[in-house]
Amino acid sequence: MAQVTAWDAEVDLLVAGAGPGGMAAALVGALEGLEVMVCEKSGQIGGTASTSAGTLWIPGNTQSRRAGYDDSPEQAEIYMDRLVGGPKGRDLRSVYLETGPAAIDYYDTRTDVQFLPCGRHPDYQQNMAGAAVTGRAIVPKPFDGRLLGEDFRLVRPPIGEFMIFGGMMVGKDDIPRLIGRFKSAANFTHSAKLFLRYLSDRLKYPRGTRIAMGNALVARLFYSLRKHKVPIRLDTAIRELVREDGRQDGRVVGAVVDSGGRTLRVRTRKGVVLATGGFAHNREFRKAFMPQPVPVHSLACETDTGDGLTLAQAAGARIDGDQHRGGAFWTPVSVTRRTGNWRGLFPHLALDRAKPGLIAVNAAGRRFVNEGASYHDFVEAMFDSHKLVPTMPAWLICDSAFVAKYGLGVVHPGTRNLAPHEKSGYLTTAPTLEDLARKIGVDPAGLADSVRRHNGFARTGSDLDFGKGDSELNRFNGDPENKPNPCLKPIEAAPFVAVAVWPAEIACSAGLATNVDGQVLGESGDPIQGLYACGNDMASIMAGTYPGPGTTLGPALVFAYRVAMHAAGKSDAAGKAMAGREERAAAR
Ligand SMILES: Cc1cc2nc3c(=O)[nH]c(=O)nc-3n(C[C@H](O)[C@H](O)[C@H](O)COP(=O)(O)OP(=O)(O)OC[C@H]3O[C@@H](n4cnc5c(N)ncnc54)[C@H](O)[C@@H]3O)c2cc1C
């Protein structure tokens, strides 16, 4: 713990990390009259969120209600209680539900961080009481990166695997229109416009400026911070916290930061906010909080090395990990081959697994999961299966007609020539299932039996083993035109195809214990004055469970709002916003 007598700078709030958690706290702080400084360890803003889908899970949000999708926060509370369970953390969950809509309205009306309702986007545990099919998910409005001018270069880009032509982002709604570009004049015009805009962008910018999803979220936060003249120091990492008079139990009164080779001592009048993205790239924390075998892949931004947790722990903070199941939020990923020796990761979130004509098997060639389950549940099933049969990797198995129609991982729909992908080592093909099994090291008899059984289910429309296609979530990601079951179709047209998938986290769940205002708690359970956490540095209120789309970004933005309000001495205003929600609910 540093003892500092001379300071280089003084602000109200010092925010460490320019991901969505940090930028949102900084933005609300600035709007509430605080003098704020953001320090960001890397050379770009956005963190992991810049590569994310950008969805927020906000039960009872105004944007959905206005669009005709009503929701009941009371039902959401029942759902969360069932899913997350236990009295521990219930206060944070309640406050989340109570503050969520008001916090989003605050961003929506007072900043450029604006949202659209997703409409139908089912919760991930459809069999649980309180689960919803519509109304809880929102996404950031797409953003025109040209508004940032030269600063657009400072926005961390999405992962290469999610862009086409080397730099063009496509939103979820663009995908069917691009695939069906020759099917209707409207689709063709839409696709042509996207392409022409992209060409003109590339004359001036390193990538397309029509941005969506998580990239739009961070760009919108950045744009708003610029408007409010909040300084963001890039290449600047928080290194140490400073306690009052150097006392171990003193208030946090500032921090030491490394800024481009210089050391700066920054005094804080109201507090330091830790929003450094969690511990994804910290080997020790991974070992401590993740299941065995500790996954080797991570989709988190490489600068998320657990700095917030390490600094807070040194200041006596408590890390909540025990109740967080696998310590993280998961997705299966396939390993892509980029040019040279580069490897990339493709997250199999929603585009292929639920579609008809694909199964996932372990080394015994046996199915172990409903392939249309959420990405998080899919990986939890991998961990379970691996206890008995090697399931790391698991294999997605389909036929070439499936790939041509729906795509597979990084292979786009419409692809008929799989040779380049096989040559690169991304996928494996074979003329028979037996050959395929031998090539990938899976039991041939097991695979043949699994495919035969699955094909029978596809013909009757009922998956008696795992219920693929039974839930709203499965059907949402399936193919509604496929009958009788939108998620089942025989796998029978050679060549057969396999791709290996591994677990990787999209975010951490274990993190710093906080109270409802994001104040970091010490081992005694009392808040450490002057120290806040949000985003993945804060232990997730979902405790390693995954209720629906937007499980981490929702809490990141809501608790960032509460942190800033508390630091500004306006927790009451956040409380009034909650009361407003109750009044609105009563008026419905
Ligand atoms: C493919 C993918 C899709 C996803 N989709 C969704 C989704 O749709 N909805 C959802 O809810 N979640 C989603 N997520 C998860 C979501 O992106 C993360 O939970 C979110 O980015 C966490 O925000 P954060 O601000 O805590 O961390 P980050 O976004 O990682 O930002 C942390 C920042 O802190 C900086 N930093 C690190 N150490 C220091 C230091 N010492 N000093 C200063 N700065 C530091 C980092 O450089 C980084 O810029 C997805 C993730 C992935 C990978």
Image (spheres, grey):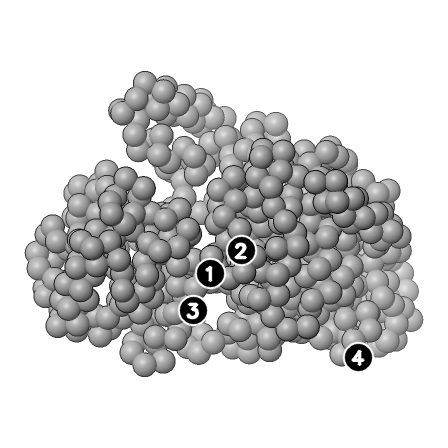
**Marks 1/3: CA distance?**
17 Å
Q: Mark yes or no: residue 155 visible.
A: no
Q: In the displayed structure, does residue 581 sit left or right of residue 63?
A: right
Quadrant placement of the C terminus:
top right
Q: Residue at x 33, y 47 (%)?
A: 478
Q: Which residue is mark 3?
A: 380
- Determine which of the numbered discs, if any, sits on residue 131 in the image: 2
User: CB atoms at circles 4 and 3 under 8 Å apart?
Assistant: no
> In terms of sequence position, does the residue under pointer 1 or pointer 3 come before the other?
1
Q: Amino acid at mark 4?
A: Ser
Mark 1 secondary-structure assignment? loop
What amino acid type should be assigned to the residue bearing mark 3?
Glu
Q: CA distance from mark 4 to mark 3?
A: 33 Å
Q: Residues within 10 Å of mark 3 (few under 14, many from 20)?
A: many
Q: Is residue 405 above or below residue 448?
A: above
Q: Residues within 10 Å of mark 4 (few under 14, many from 20)?
A: few
Q: Position of residue 469 (x, y in %)?
A: 33, 54
Cα separation, mark 2 vs mark 4, equals 36 Å
Disc 4 and disc 1: Cα gap in Å?
38 Å
Quadrant of residue 392 within the rendered picture: bottom left
